[in-house]
Image: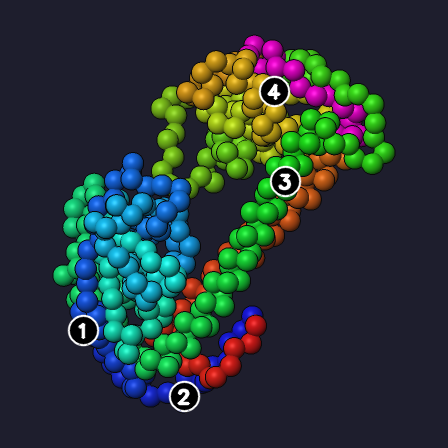
């Protein structure tokens, strides 16, 4: 996917209050280009699964990306009569949020249906003869504009922004035909991102289906037959407690990466206040029953390191495919059986080794374990590749936005996809 652009030298630039822009562009305040109004409060118990579509302020920064065409929430006609109607081309701002990045987040409404704005939604109706709503929604995410919005946020635990503030926002404004061309190009990136994310969701659903069927023996791979053994987990895994390795690095349990060094965690990490002589050694290939009983509470370790004495470290007593059980311990089948064995697991109850031993788990032949693991690993790799592609597209689009919406790159008449 690529765009055709002119060269930097073909454009004359001028200095403005928001930086250099092409000489034929202008800097305008939003208040000069349209009018603001406010949405009306829609109570949580008034939101339906069907009816007239509405957009609530929290959905602007959680459910939409630049453009809103489909809906998450609906209201009945009586509620709609007291609500603010939004029209195609209106730009919606979140009037409040928990962070300065959430407040002022905006989307352009491009749907054809009559829709309504909830409370704390600021509705901006731009002059369509001057402004492309879709291009404006991208422009409002420029670094220079976001920086202005951050200074406008008011409040502590909940941050607010008001129409009178948004009216002062300064934006670079290309001629209307160029705005439409910019929006057209950026929308092609959005479409590619959306398609890739849709494929990710499909692959993830397929992976769940494979797990539910392959890891329980409901579906068998070619070449395998016969009934599976189901035995106590304590017959397959033993608890080990190797101590006296105080110099090893500390590990933490994560939901998506298993046991990883604490140095790999993002953000602030709590370190032990006492020595680690009594901590347990975890070796590559071990499983750990963590205190955090999410998704069954069993995590696989690709790393050697230490965990708190409160954790249970498991090693196999029988030949196993580590990948098979890594997948099985994340399956609904295992979590369901464990939840029955441990009343209160969803409330964060620690899982003991004795609790774990009461659960019956499948023990197919090592050959079948390995074959199933390979199928699920292939599914994981497909998902990882698609996620990497989506991130790459997002980064490309982010860079393109900064170039096109500041006039550093100018478009010709065609788009190559």
**Is residue 148 left or right of 392 when viewed as pictured?**
left
* Mark 4–mark 3 distance (CA, rounded to whole Å): 26 Å
Kindly report which numbered mark, 4 or 3, lies closer to the viewer in this rendering. Answer: 3
Residue wearing tag 4: 314
Q: Residue at x 59, y 47 (%)?
A: 202
Q: Nearer the viewer, mark 2 or mark 3?
A: 3
Q: Are marks 1 and 4 in contact (CB under 8 Å)?
A: no
- Taking the image as shown, residue 207 lies to the left or right of residue 340, namely right
Q: Residue 156, percent across and down? A: 18, 43
Query: Residue 336: x percent and y percent?
Result: 56, 22
Is residue 42 visible in this depiction of the protein? Answer: yes
Decide which of tag 2 and tag 4 comes sooner along the chain.
2
- Dot 2 falls on a residue whose secondary structure is helix
**Mark 3 element type:** helix
Q: Which residues are magenta?
A: 354-370
Is 35 placed left or right of 144 in the picture?
left
In the drawing, what numbered circle is on residue 210? none
Say which residue appears at 54% left-offset and 33% top-offset: 258
Labelled disc at residue 32: 1
């Amino acid at each position: 996917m690529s765009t055709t652009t002119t060269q930097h030298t073909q454009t004359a630039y001028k200095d403005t209050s928001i930086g250099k822009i092409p000489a034929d562009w202008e800097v305008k305040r939003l208040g000069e280009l349209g009018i603001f109004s406010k949405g009306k409060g829609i109570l949580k118990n008034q939101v339906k699964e069907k009816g007239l579509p509405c957009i609530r302020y929290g959905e602007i920064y959680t459910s939409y990306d630049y453009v809103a065409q489909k809906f998450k929430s609906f209201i009945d006609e009586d509620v709609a009569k007291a609500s603010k109607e939004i029209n195609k081309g209106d730009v919606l701002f979140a009037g409040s949020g928990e962070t300065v990045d959430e407040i002022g987040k905006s989307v352009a409404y491009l749907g054809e249906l009559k829709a309504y704005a909830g409370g704390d939604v600021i509705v901006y109706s731009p002059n369509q003869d001057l402004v492309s709503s879709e291009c404006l929604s991208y422009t409002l995410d420029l670094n220079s504009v976001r920086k202005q919005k951050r200074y406008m946020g008011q409040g502590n635990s909940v941050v607010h922004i008001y129409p009178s503030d948004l009216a002062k926002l300064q934006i670079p404004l290309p001629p209307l035909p160029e705005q439409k061309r910019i929006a057209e190009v950026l929308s092609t990136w959005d479409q590619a991102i959306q398609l890739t994310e849709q494929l990710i969701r499909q692959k993830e659903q397929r992976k769940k289906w494979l797990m539910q069927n392959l890891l329980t023996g409901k579906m068998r791979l070619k070449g395998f037959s016969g009934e599976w053994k189901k035995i106590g987990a304590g017959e397959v895994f033993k608890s080990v407690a190797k101590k006296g390795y105080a110099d090893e690095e500390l590990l933490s349990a994560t939901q998506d990466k298993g046991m990883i060094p604490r140095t790999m965690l993002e953000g602030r990490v709590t370190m032990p206040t006492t020595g680690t002589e009594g901590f347990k050694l975890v070796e590559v290939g071990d499983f750990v029953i963590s205190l955090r009983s999410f998704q069954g509470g069993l995590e696989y370790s690709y790393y050697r390191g230490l965990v708190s004495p409160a954790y249970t470290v498991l090693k196999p007593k029988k030949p196993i495919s580590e990948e098979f059980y890594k997948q099985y311990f994340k399956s609904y089948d295992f979590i369901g059986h464990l939840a029955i064995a441990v009343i209160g697991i969803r409330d964060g109850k620690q899982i003991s080794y004795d609790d774990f031993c009461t659960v019956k788990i499948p023990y197919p032949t090592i050959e079948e374990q390995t074959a199933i693991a390979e199928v699920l690993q292939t599914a994981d790799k497909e998902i990882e590749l698609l996620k990497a592609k989506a991130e790459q597209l997002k980064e490309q689009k982010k860079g393109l936005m900064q170039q096109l919406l500041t006039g550093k790159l100018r478009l010709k008449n065609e788009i190559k996809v």
